[in-house]
Image: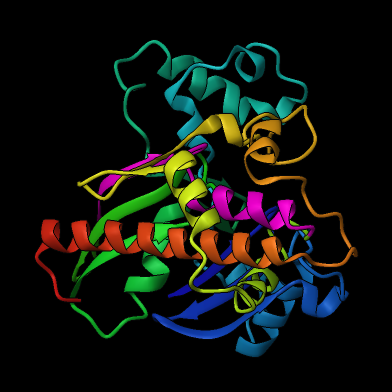
Amino acid sequence: MRILGLNHDMYISSAALLVDGRIVAATPEERFTRSKHTRAFPQNAIQYCLNEADVAIEEIDYIANAWNPAIYFSSFNPLISTNRRFKHEYLISVPDNILAMSDLTDQSPKYVMQKIPYQDFEQTFYYITHHMTHAANAFFTSPFDDAAIFTADSQGEIQSTTFGYGNDNNLTTLKSINHPHSLGAFYATFTEYLGYRAHSDEWKVVALAAYSDKEDRTYYDLISNNLITKFEDGSYELNLMYFKDFIFDQPNLYSDALINLLGPARKSNTPFESRHYQIAAAMQKIIEETVFSSLTALQKKTNSRN
């Protein structure tokens, strides 16, 4: 069994090849094009994986992509369903029109399967829900037969955080939090506020936090009391008046409200002030506390020590 996995059109496009359940090759496209964080289709990465396994693309049994467009079928979208731009958008518009006539639109499809038959060859594609691929990557490469599974990033199709459970060959999503309530978006907003490139330079913010005065709680209290609320079930909510990640026609991920609360944002390549260290450390601590709150609730729910 040969499965080619793709991460395409996201922050770091990449490919991985599994043969009989074993990873034989995996690489990001940027290693070949030297374009850091490229979103280009991973043509070179795919070819590398095929070469490592000495197989042709026609010998691949399944191709899996880490994004599931069928999630958007859960709400009829006339922009793509009745106003298709190209004939190949029938692949979206026809099922969306049909599903709008059913009672299924309150459910989220787990994946889309697409078969393209030729005369003597058939290629099968799977489009997998993004956070399910994160969960699978964690669980199926772990030594555990069962485990609690927590995933968090900026955003999948609509999910930003999931609470799940893995047992043998099965993954179950117990609960999810949807964008714009997102720990990844929270972190990216502060990355940009501190003068760095969001979704790229977060590691620099981690380092920045190390220069803080650990005894000073000024910015910790401001951020904790105003920007995020944690709940007993492990979920959380952002105060969206401070964020603009979900407003696509405006610059900056942070709003004027955040500037009014914490002061002016740092411009790139300008000197650091002591408050920048304090803000980085406070935000980092709050992220960690939120994640541990979620993990504690998930452990109680699953009763799993893994």
Residue at 18% in and 71% down:
168
Residue 135: x percent and y percent? 37, 63
Q: Give whichever of 180, 173 is nearer the camera.
A: 180
**Magenta-drawn segment:** 172-195
Left or right, residue 148 beside residue 141? left
Residue at 73% in and 57% down:
194
**Residue 282 drawn above or below residue 80:** below
**Residue 6 drawn above or below residue 17:** above
Magenta-colored stretch includes residue 298: no
Q: Is residue 128 visible?
A: no
Residue at 47% in and 39% down:
226
Q: Give whichever of 153, 92 is nearer the camera.
A: 153
Q: Residue 273: which quarter of the image?
A: bottom right
Left or right, residue 201 beside residue 184? right
Q: Give whichever of 212, 86 is nearer the camera.
A: 212
Residue at 33% in and 14% down:
102
Magenta-colored stretch includes residue 175: yes
